[in-house]
Amino acid sequence: MTITVMNGAVSADQICRLVDFELPLTHVKETTGEWQLGRISVSRLNTSFRCDETGRLTETSCLRKQAFGPTEGGRRGIAVIFREFDRSPQQTTPREHFAGWVPAERERSLDRWIEFLHGEIADRRRGIASRQAYATYKLGEAVTVELYLQGRVRLVHARRGVRRGWSARALPELWPALTAALAAAAFPAPPDAEDGEEFELSVNRDGRTSSVRGAASASYRDVSRLFADLIGQLSRDEVLGFEPEIRTRFVVDPIADEA
């Protein structure tokens, strides 16, 4: 069951007819190219959104809260509604979509999720892709690699007060390789070794950040190899001191830039 109001705002009665069949929202979910809150998904890359259908964000696109209850099932809470527009050339009334609901005691969490998505919507309208790195890998104190879902890889090397940076475009092969390496490591399980060069890995997915820190180990072998390949492909031998043998090319067009 879905609710899209073509002409006018979603009403409390309409919400009550739906929420008894819906589980409450728990978090903002991150997918490969979208931020999702219940039924509404906002692109991380452009102005598209998905709800009951696909559309484009407008200058008045926003999320709003609406109290409801009790329903026939006895539920009370706060619904979140996505307003596609206030008006358009085709109609003079709003168009809205029901996105989901939370119990009243989780209203503060809902406020944070709405604030976050409003920031993302504002960025998309300004033509800015999501700036949060999907994965960040730190090797020792000197090397940081950041992977962005819009297809950019960033390497920064800081040593003895000198910072150097490289950027490159990610190839499609990178993402399944990263997924497989994380699965092989049972990420975010801790490394199974105490000796070795320290690394730290953070991954943002499903709207949450998971991190692990420790010494390079057999369990994280595939992760270490993947990021060593990335470091070598971006900087050649300038960071590692040698060029790793290229098994799979993950980036193209690397350029040195200001760190």
Image (cartoon, rainbow, N blue to C red):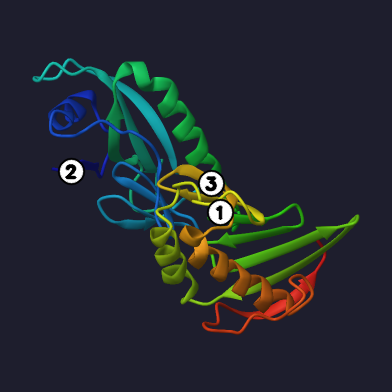
Q: Which of labels 3 and 2 is toward the front?
A: 3
Residue tagged by mark 3? 212
Q: Under tag 1, what secondary structure? A: loop
Relative depth, front residue between 127 and 203: 203
Q: Which amino acid lies under the numbered mark 2 shown in the image of this protein?
A: Thr
Mark 2: give few (<14), some (14-19) or many (20+) Cα within 10 Å: few
For marks 2 and 1, give the one nearer the viewer: 1
Residue furthest left in the image: 72
Which numbered disc, 3 or 1, marks the residue that appears first in the sequence? 1
Sequence-first tag of 2 and 1: 2
For this rendering, which residue is in front, 221 or 201? 221
The part of the image, by quadrant, that contains residue 207 is top left
Name the amino acid, label 1: Ser
Can you tell which of label 3 and label 1 is closer to the viewer? 3
Residue 116: tell me if it is visible.
yes
From the viewer's perspective, is residue 111 above or below residue 222? above
Task: Identify which residue is drawn at 18% across, 30% down.
Answer: 19
CB under 8 Å between discs 3 and 2: no
| Closer-to-camera residue (248/133) | 248
In the rendered image, the vertical position of residue 249 relative to residue 202, given as above or below:
below
Instruction: Look at mark 1 in the image and give the residue it sits on.
Output: 130
Q: Which image quadrant is residue 160 in?
A: bottom right
Q: Marks 2 and 1: CB-CB under 8 Å? A: no
* Residue 69 pos. (x, y %): 20, 17
